[in-house]
Image (cartoon, rainbow, N blue to C red):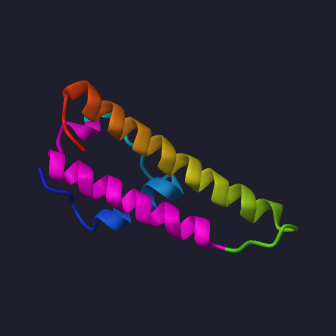
Amino acid sequence: MAIAGSPKKLAQDLAEGYMSMTPPMLRQYTATDMKTILNNIAIVLRDLRQQTIPAEDVMAIKQRNTKMSRLNQASVVIRSFCKKRRIPV
């Protein structure tokens, strides 16, 4: 099944915590869909790393780190799902 909506928006929703990647959810995607999602996760991660936040703004730093952690976790879930199913990504 194709990705509903924009893959970049999906990655942003993952970062915000509106949705999470789970193996049952990944069954509906093809190998090319998962590659696209991984690429867009990398793009959103890059955008988050580029943000400059003052050292005094502890809450903003915490929010950015939480978003990055969510994206890294989603990437790990996708890669492990693909490895288990022998899907090349």
Left or right of 14? Residue 29 is left
**Percent x, y of residue 60:** 73, 65
Left or right of 2? Residue 13 is right
The answer to whether 20 is drawn above or below residue 27 in the figure is below
**Percent x, y of residue 83:** 28, 30
Q: Which residue is most to the right?
A: 56
Residue 13 position by quadrant: bottom left
**Percent x, y of residue 43:** 42, 65
The residue closer to the viewer here, 37 or 3, is 37
Left or right of 82? Residue 47 is right
Residue 86 position by quadrant: top left
Is residue 58 part of the magenta span, yes or no?
A: no
Which residues fall within the magenta stretch? 25-51
The answer to whether 32 is drawn above or below residue 79 in the figure is below
Q: Residue at x 42, y 59 (%)?
A: 42
Q: Which residue is most to the front?
A: 88
Q: How many marks?
A: 0
Is residue 50 part of the magenta span, yes or no?
A: yes
Q: Residue at x 57, y 47 (%)?
A: 69
**Percent x, y of residue 88:** 20, 40
Q: Residue at x 60, y 72 (%)?
A: 50
Q: What secondary structure characterizes most of the magenta part?
A: helix
The residue closer to the viewer here, 5 or 32, is 32
The residue closer to the viewer here, 56 or 20, is 56
Quarter containing the C terminus = top left
The answer to whether 7 is drawn above or below residue 38 in the figure is below
Q: Which residue is most to the top?
A: 84
Left or right of 53? Residue 44 is left
Residue 29 position by quadrant: top left
